[in-house]
Image: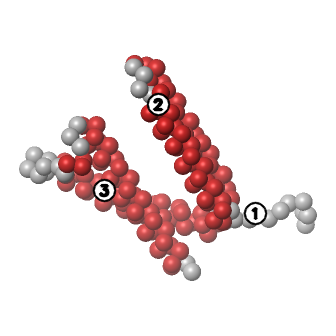
Amino acid sequence: MNGGVKPKRPLGLAGFAATIGVTMLVGGLAGAGSALFGEQPGAVGLAITVAMISAAMAVGFAACIWWWRGIDEAAREAHKWAWWWGGSGGLAVGGVLLLTVMIRADTQPLPAGVGSSPADIFISGMMAVVLFQLAGYALAWAGWWLKHR
């Protein structure tokens, strides 16, 4: 028996809260930096925006890796199952909604909150799909845990 190796302990709620807190802080800083400095004209503004968002994504990805390595096998399986079934189901629902809206766009006006410019409509569509995926993921994750308790 190797006495020098400690067994892996799950991170628990404190580890999850720390991961969420760090990623929210970095995301907020990247958003604020992009808003303050990204309005520069031309390539400078584009480079600043890309750098800020890339840095935030890198930190978020690193936080996710740290968190993933600290959870137990049951939690990993729940998240993998929820990612596949919930995320795929949410993508399907969001895709049906977006395709229906696009096909019927000439006969059915879009709600005012969606936006009027192509960029606003694109962003609204992306956010709708992400929210459907998140809702599907949450439902599938909760279902997995209820089934395996």
Q: Badge 3, how many Cα within 10 Å: few under 14, some, many 20+?
A: many
Sequence order check, earlier mark of 1 and 2:
1
Q: CA distance from mark 1 to mark 2?
A: 43 Å
Q: Are marks 3 and 1 in contact (CB under 8 Å)?
A: no
Judging by the rendered image, the residue that carries numbered circle 1 is 8
Looking at the rendered structure, the secondary structure element under dot 3 is helix
Task: Report the quarter where the C terminus lies.
Answer: bottom right
Residue type marked 1: Lys
Looking at the rendered structure, the secondary structure element under dot 1 is loop
Q: Badge 1, how many Cα within 10 Å: few under 14, some, many 20+?
A: few
Residue type marked 2: Leu
Q: Residue 115's image quarter?
A: top left
For the point 48% across and 39% down, the residue is 31
Residue 87 visible in the shown view:
no
Task: Report the quarter where the N terminus lies.
Answer: bottom right
Sequence order check, earlier mark of 2 and 3:
2
For the point 44% across and 33% down, the residue is 35
Judging by the rendered image, the residue that carries numbered circle 2 is 36
